[in-house]
Amino acid sequence: MPEKKGAEGALTFAPNAIQVRHARLIEVAFKTNEQFPLLEAGSTLKLDPYPIKLSTFVGKFDPAKSTPPILLPTFHVKVAVELIDPSAEGQSPPYEFKVHVEGMFQCMADNNDIDALALANVHGTSYLFNMAREIIASLTSRSRHGLALLPLVVFQHDGEAVLTVMNPPPEVGDSNEA
């Protein structure tokens, strides 16, 4: 295994059993709140105090309906991150945004020892959330109130995930809210 040296010792890593086949941006909307007070230059704005809506969807491709045939378990994953003005709940946020991303993830090991759905739920949503987080950071870094970072989050598989067997993929609005 490749080894990477760090301050606390050696870190080993290996490829994940689930791999991204493609990931893409579907929709982005962005607006600056001109009424929000300006921050000190170089400040990083934390979005933790504002209500961020996160929606996810995981669907499994039906191999029988796929052309060409899909031989390994393959999942379509969507993540939508939104911050909209909750003016009734306090101070309006510095930005309003909506970012929808999606990807196709494939489990590289087709055996009963691996829970491919759990891998798609945890790693697929995490990968896409971080993609949306990066898009928001990039947009805000050049905006009136400066860089805004979404909080880091941990996605966990609760064993109760809703799985939809689908072909073709659903529209962006079809989701399971988290």
Image: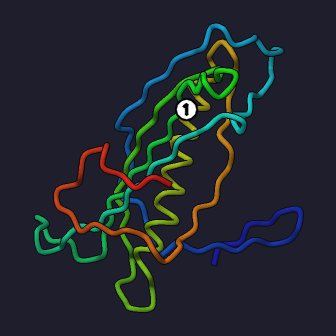
Q: Residue furthest front?
A: 88
* Front residue of this view, candidates 79 and 25: 79
Residue 59 coordinates in the image, percent (x, y): 31, 63
Instruction: Identify the residue at horizontal 55%, vertical 32% (top origin).
Output: 83
In the displayed orientation, state which residue is furthest to the right.
Answer: 7
Q: Say which of 176 and 165 sits in front.
A: 176
Task: Say above or below: 143 vs 88.
Answer: above
Pick the front one: 32 or 90: 90
Left or right placement of residue 54 versus residue 91 in this view: left
Quadrant hosting residue 126: bottom right
- Local crowd size for mark 1, using a 10 Å CA cut-off: few (<14), some (14–19), many (≥20): some
Find residue 108 and report its horizontal and vertical position in percent: 39, 76
Q: Quadrant of residue 96?
A: top right
**SS for dot 1:** strand
In percent of the image, x 74 and y 66: which residue is there? 4
Residue receiving disc 1: 83
Front residue of 67 and 143:
143
Name the side, left or right, on which 86 lies relative to 80.
right
User: Which quarter of the figure is the N terminus placed in?
Assistant: bottom right
Amino acid marked by disc 1: Leu
- In the displayed image of the protein, which residue is found farthest to the top? 34
**Residue drawn at (38%, 56%), measured in percent from left and top?**
57
Q: Residue furthest bottom?
A: 112
Q: How is the image coloured?
A: rainbow
Q: Residue at x 51, y 64 (%)?
A: 123
Q: Describe residue 153's horizontal placement relative to residue 160 as left or right.
A: right
Point out residue 106 in the picture as x, y percentages from the top left corner: 36, 68
